[in-house]
Amino acid sequence: MVWLMSDDSNKNDTDYLEIIAEDLKSNNLLECKENDSGKGVSSVLPDQLKRLNFGAFFLSPFWGYAHKIKLGYFALATYVIWILSIALFYRTYTTQNYYILTVIRIEIDILLTFSFIFLFKGNEMAWRSCHFESIKQFKAVNRTWLFWGITVTILRFLLAFIVFCLMLIYH
């Protein structure tokens, strides 16, 4: 801090404050913000977290519910109705009554809408609704969601393929 050693008596206090502020900015000391996660709308998403959230995309109904996001409750309810509709479709499949396919299609569209909302706005929603100790913890939690989201998605596709093959074989 060279400016403290200067003998310039013409500088006033505001000049010294400006020099201190410039020094702090150059060392990025002013960029340290308080962790305000979990404080609702007043929470500001850090720049490191302004990116897509694929964990929320793959497991949107459960991710939204786990992060206490109101939209997540609707996604979970839609998911439950979708599962029940699939069960009903299997029952009506034998009677050639395909009206339930329209319901399943609408529910899939709704679930995809929730998934894309959480993909683009998930980090912001989670940061505002849940308290995290640090950005590192937030990233670790969402990496876990991503791992399980990919795993569950692969398993769902495999299960759907097996069920489809069995329906073709035994029908």
Image (cartoon, grey):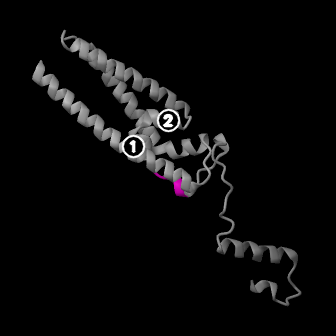
Disc 1 residue type (three-letter): Trp
Quickly name the residue at label 2.
Answer: 64
Q: Which residue lies furthest to the top in this view?
A: 95
Quickly name the residue at label 1.
Answer: 148
- Residue 43 horizontal/vertical position (percent): 64, 46
Q: Distance between the residues labelled 1 and 2?
A: 14 Å
Above or below 133: residue 40: above
**Residue at the image position 74 percent from the left and 83 percent from the top:** 1
Disc 2 residue type (three-letter): Gly
**Residue at the image position 69 percent from the left and 66 percent from the top:** 30
Above or below 168: residue 124: below
- Residue 125 horizontal/vertical position (percent): 55, 41
* In the displayed structure image, the side of residue 111 where residue 40 appears, left or right: right
**Residue at the image position 60 percent from the left and 42 percent from the top:** 130
Asked if residue 119 is among those painted magenta in the image, a careful observer would answer no
Q: Give the range drawn in magenta.
A: 48-52
Q: What element carries label 2?
A: helix
Q: Is mark 1 on a helix, strand or loop?
A: helix
* In the displayed structure image, the side of residue 64 where residue 38 appears, left or right: right
Q: Residue furthest bottom?
A: 7
**Residue at the image position 46 percent from the left and 40 percent from the top:** 118
On the image, which quarter does residue 19 sit in? bottom right
